Image: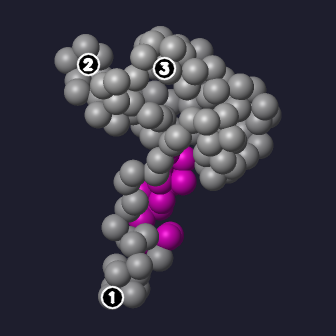
Amino acid sequence: MYHAGLSGLTEVSLPESESLEDDAWHLYPIQLHLNRLRATREEIIRELHGRRIGTSVHFIPLHLHPFYQKSYGYRRKDFPNASYVFERLILLPIYSRMSEQDVHDVITAVYDVVNDYRI
C-alpha cells in the first residue's frame, strides 16, 4: 500500500525491491529530496508527529556516533555519501497490526506534509 500510495510524490524516493510481496518489510524507509522541499528532515518528522504519525531514524552511520568521533576523530564530511543519505532518510511506521486505515492515514499525512513544504 505504501508503494502504491506514495509513488506519485517526486519529493521522496521509495525503497526498491525486485518483488514487493516477497520482502519482509519490517522497516519502510523513504528518502526525502530536500532540494524539492522547504524543510529539513527534522522539520518533516516534527510535522508528521504533529499529525500523530510516529517516524524514526533507525540507521545512524558509524562515523556519526560519538564513540567513533571521539576515538577516531571522524567528522560528518569524512563519509559524504553516508551523511547525505542519513540526513534525508526517515522510516515510516510498519507493523503487523496496522490496519488499512492506519496505512492510509500515514500516506495522507506524508502527502499533506510534502504538499505544505513543496518548493
Q: Residue at x 39, y 51 (%)?
A: 58
Which region of the structure is painted magenta? Answer: 76-90
Q: What residue do we see at 29% from left, 34% from top?
A: 26
Measuring 34% from the left and 24% from the top, which residue is drawn there? 97
Q: Which residue is pictured at 46% across the width and 28% down the height?
A: 14
- For residue 30, say whether it is visible: yes
Which residue is farthest left? Answer: 22
Name the spot of residue 5 as percent of width and height, x first. 52, 14
Give the number of the disc on residue 103.
3
Q: Is residue 2 magenta?
A: no
Taking the image as drawn, is residue 7 in sight?
no
Mark 3 to mark 1: distance in Å? 42 Å
Q: Locate residue 81, reporting x and y percent.
A: 44, 55
Q: What residue type is labelled 2?
A: Glu
- Where residue 33 sits: x, y (%)? 61, 38
Q: Considering the numbered disc 2 on the image, is that residue within a helix, a strand or a loop?
A: loop
Q: Residues within 10 Å of mark 2 (few under 14, many from 20)?
A: few
Q: Distance between the residues labelled 3 and 2?
A: 22 Å
The answer to which of 72 and 28 lies nearer the viewer is 28
Q: Are marks 3 and 2 in contact (CB under 8 Å)?
A: no
Colour mode? Answer: one colour
For residue 71, which numbered disc appears in the image?
1
Q: What residue type is labelled 1?
A: Ser
Quick one: label 2 or label 1, which is nearer the N terminus? 2
- Mark seen at residue 18: 2
Q: Nearer the viewer, residue 71 or 1?
A: 1
Q: Which of marks 3 and 1 is nearer the N terminus?
A: 1
The secondary structure that dominates the magenta segment is helix
**Residue 51 falls in image quadrant:** top right
Kind of residue at badge 3: Val
User: Along the polypeptide, which appears first: circle 3 or circle 2?
Assistant: 2
Q: What element carries label 1?
A: helix
